[in-house]
Amino acid sequence: MAYIRIDMGSASNAIRPETAHQISGEIASLELDDSIRAIILGHAGKHFVGGADFTFLESLKTASDNTIREEIYGSFQGLTRRLYRCRKPTVAAIAGAAVTIGCEAAIACDFRIVTKDARFQESWIRLGLMPPLGGLKTLPALVGYGLASDMVLRGRAVGGEEAVQCGLAHMLVSPEELDNAAITLATELAQAAPLAYAAAKENLRRGLDRDLDDVLRIGIDVQTTLIKSDDFAEGVDAAVAKRAARFSGH
């Protein structure tokens, strides 16, 4: 079993493309290691991942289409794709915020263990964006179209207790129990027959209507257009200034 702990050294634990690429590479290496039978994705500090780093978001205002497509979402989509396609069991251990990128990464894992203070939020709409990392496929499959619409179109947050009740998370534990609960579940999953687990997981994914690659491809196209909009620039400015955004529709 391997434990990947996200630690950006900041209060929000916000990440950049380089971090996503690094985590994705680590998961790829662990997939090739026969001694590793399960992977836990957790975090240091108060939050799992509080979204993207604001400095990075600011840089997107002037980024070229190629930068957005090939570098930025190549990294972030690479992470969610790697988690979603991983043949080994994956468990996310979440306390605090799992916002935008954090939410998409968490729901790409097989299982989620949360504390009461956990908070899942697809708040892309508040930046003038949409979820581009696969969540438009995985979230409705987990919680149903109605709640997924509420989370995506309103940016509504779902706390730890509600997450377990609606199927977004699998287990609610105290903060002190989080690591041990994740390790216990990962240890259990590691006992499963690897080939059977991989096959069952792959075919569960195939049972969903739309192929993940289609969702990811659409995500890149639409998000590239949205990042070029005035609304995205206003969304970032408002988030940095901690004020309500004033979107113009341009």
Image: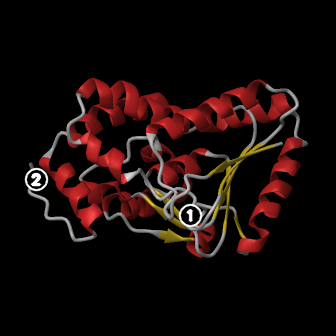
Q: Residues within 10 Å of mark 2 (few under 14, many from 20)?
A: few
Residue 192 visible in image: yes
Name the kind of residue labelled 1 in the image: His
Q: Which residue is mark 2?
A: 249
Residue 112: image location, x then y, percent? 66, 57
Q: What residue is rendered at 85% in x and 57% in y? A: 184
- If the image is split into quadrants, where does the N terminus sit? top right
**In the image, which is nearer the foreground, mark 1 or mark 2?**
1
Q: Is residue 244 above or below residue 226?
A: below
- Report how far apart the C-alphas of labels 1 and 2 lie in the structure: 32 Å
The residue sitting at 52% across, 57% down in the picture is 13
Inspect the image, locate mark 2, and give the three-letter code of the amino acid beneath it.
Gly
Secondary structure category for the residue under label 2: loop
Residue 158 x, y percent position in the rendering:
49, 69
Seen in the image, is 41 located left or right of residue 108? right
Disc 1 designates what residue? 47
Q: Is residue 210 visible?
A: no
Which residue is located at x 38 percent, y 47 percent? 131
- In front: 11, or 47? 11
